[in-house]
Image: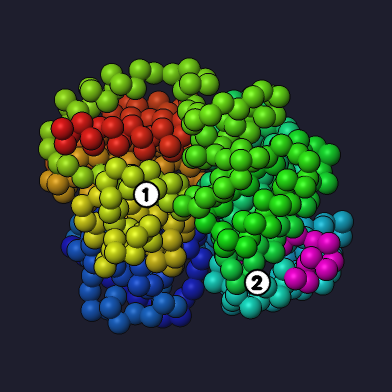
Amino acid sequence: MVYTVVRKNAYYDSVTLMLATDEVKAIDGVEEALVGMATDTNKEFLKDLGMMSKEVEEAGPNDLLIVVKGREGILDEVLKVVDNFLKGGEEEKKKEEVASSLDSALEMMPDADLVLISIAGEYAGKEAMKAVDKGLHVMLFSDNVSLEEEIEVKKKAIEKGLLVMGPDCGTAIINGVPLAFANVVRRGKVGIVAASGTGSQEVSSIVSNLGEGISQLIGTGGRDVKKDVGGLMFLEGIKWLSEDDGTEVIVLISKPPAPEVVEKAVKLVKESGKKAVVHFIRGEVKDEDLVVGKTLEDTAIKAVLLAQGKEIEKGEYSYYEIAGGRDLESMVKEQIEKIEEGKYIRGLYSGGTLADEAMVLFSKEMGCVWSPSPIDEKCKLENINESRENTVVDMGEDEFTRGRPHPMIDFTMRKERLIKEYMDPEVAIIILDVVLGYGSHMDPASEIAEAVNEARKRYGKYKLVVANILGTKDDPQGYDKQWKTLEDAGVAVFPSNATAVKFALEVWKGLRS
């Protein structure tokens, strides 16, 4: 039976509701559950689960949904668990020393010189400006900040000699301190300026895994490098690294910047007198004096080689060439023989830059790669929840996360989508990222393994599932443990997104020959 309870104007944050959902799912007799706000995303999710009702359809985004599929008479127990959990959370908040404003936070920490802002976007811009006025650097994790506010606060920050990282900045490491989604990396000579969260995580993790380290990682938010903002903080970040004695190699990472931003960035990095590697996904840098990374993996390896004083050879580097690894050719042949049906690839990513990189690499061989944010607008999905042919989806996009935690934290929707794609007889390969580090789920591999095992149990046929583990040996989730959990579930695991994508691509090509 499906039970639905709607509580009007009862708002809770998405992470709290995710944890409440997990508590409900642990009740004996519960088959499926959602405790969440009545957003369009959650309604679509319930529709896919066959748990939609008139009450859910009529609920507004400020209403709390408690929807459970389970044995008869279970609702009372569910409501008791939900109410106890939410009440306990409120009591814990009362016990903590919580600042209710920026001013009260500064009273608690008067020596602080950087503030991380993660509140609703309509208020975040004003708080960022307030922080800059007080002489504070800002990491603006919030999205949905207006373009006008972003430009205004960044111009003010530059006047005052401050950094404003964001809005929608997910990753930074300042003086060895990781902020938001970041990995446990070594300190070292490589400084990064990035208009890309998971792109900077991928590069910094590979740099660390290969024995070098990160001096600073300055995020800017993806919109910074577009024409309207003009790279205000991207260019400022280059200047900061140019003056940083601990930085010997500067790495620039971004989705395609505006041409004028590229020109200014290249000029600044060349004037810095420091070694540099540049990687603009879907973008080009035509300057023979600069080292250009072909992929995130290639960028990281070239940064390590430069930091070690080694020459950069022509061509593209791979992790396995540097660190040693498996016989990929034999692995490809083995998978071609094992796959029982299908001809298409489906990419289910939590990192937007990794999804972009996958589309770039796939499209060189496949042509059209369908996506909510495709390389070619002709390949734009009409419905983000329905894949077609070869598809890559960034499930961290706003359309998927309204009213829900980011998929690096909450795997519910990605697990359901994985099972759905696996059940499609036209699908042969599923590829995804598993992101470790601070802020991410503490055991992401187990979540993916559970979905893979369930999909194979339901469908009864073998399909290839490929995963890239983004992280370091020191990340709290345990890199080796995560790797083993995935391999035990029959997932092909790789230490970089580019290698994982190329492996999947070789299998795909083999199935067609």
Task: From this view, report whether residue 99 is shown above or below residue 315.
Answer: below
Q: Which label is found at residue 150?
A: 2
On-image quarter of the C terminus: top left
Is 448 displayed left or right of 98 in the figure?
left
User: What type is the residue that disc 1 sits on?
Assistant: Met
From the viewer's side, name the closer residue of 374 and 291.
291
> What are the residue bounds of the magenta stretch?
155-169
Task: From this view, report whether residue 335 is shown above or below residue 431.
Answer: above
| Residue 216 percent location from the top left of the image | 72, 43
From the viewer's side, name the closer residue of 311 and 331.
311
Kindly state the secondary structure of the residue where label 1 is placed.
Answer: helix
Q: How dense is the environment of label 1, judged by Cα within 10 Å: few (below 14), some, or many (20 and up)?
A: many
Q: Which label is found at residue 246?
A: none
Tell me which residue sits at (83%, 68%) in the image. Answer: 159
Res 8 visible: yes
Is 441 displayed left or right of 412 in the figure?
right
Examine the structure image and report whether residue 175 is included in the region drawn in magenta. no
| Residue 430 percent location from the top left of the image | 28, 42
Q: Which residue is mark 1?
A: 359
| Residue 469 percent location from the top left of the image | 45, 35
Tell me which residue sits at (66%, 76%) in the image. Answer: 149
On-image quarter of the N terminus: bottom left
Q: How many marks?
A: 2
